[in-house]
Amino acid sequence: MILFRNSMPQLDLHGEDRIGAKIKLCTFIKDNYELEESEIAIVHGIGKGILKKEVLNVLRNDKRVSEYNIDCFNEGCTLARLEKKNNKREKTRGNN
């Protein structure tokens, strides 16, 4: 289970429509993955649950997300853990 920390990157989606929220969330995940952040928070609010459903759908289908859960103290926030970035460039050391 992921627990909220004040220092984790946060995305606030209040006031967004479903499509705008999806675009912002995908960019947020990409940026934080590139920055090698391990955990992120997405604030979607409670409302009718439209944004929450979209957030969960994006997280479920993004291969960079290894785990996610609704914050146990705030059901209007979802927390996610990102995979570690695989550096495809391998360091080579000559044994000459």
Image (tube, rainbow, N blue to C red):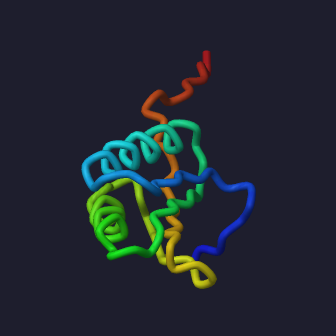
Q: Nearer the viewer, residue 26 or 93?
A: 26
Q: In the displayed orientation, state which residue is furthest to the top.
A: 96
Looking at the rendered structure, the number of numbered marks drawn on it comes to: 0
Residue 72's spot in the image, x, y percent? 58, 84
- Give the quadrant of residue 13: bottom left
Quarter of image, res 59: bottom left
Q: Which of 70 and 32 is in front in this view?
A: 70
Tell me the quadrant of the picture where the C terminus can be found.
top right
- Percent x, y for residue 41? 56, 60
Q: Is residue 53 above or below residue 91?
A: below
The one nearer the camera, 63 or 3, is 3
Q: Is residue 89 above or below residue 52?
A: above
- Residue under the point 46% across and 44% down: 28
Indicate whether 88 appears above or below 93: below
Q: Does residue 90 appear to the left or right of 2 in the view shown?
A: left
44 or 5: nearer the viewer: 44
Instruction: Judge whether 78 appears above or below 92 on screen.
Output: below
- Residue name at image x 50 percent, y 73 percent: 76
Q: Residue at x 26, y 60 (%)?
A: 61
Q: Where's residue 73, x and y in %? A: 63, 83
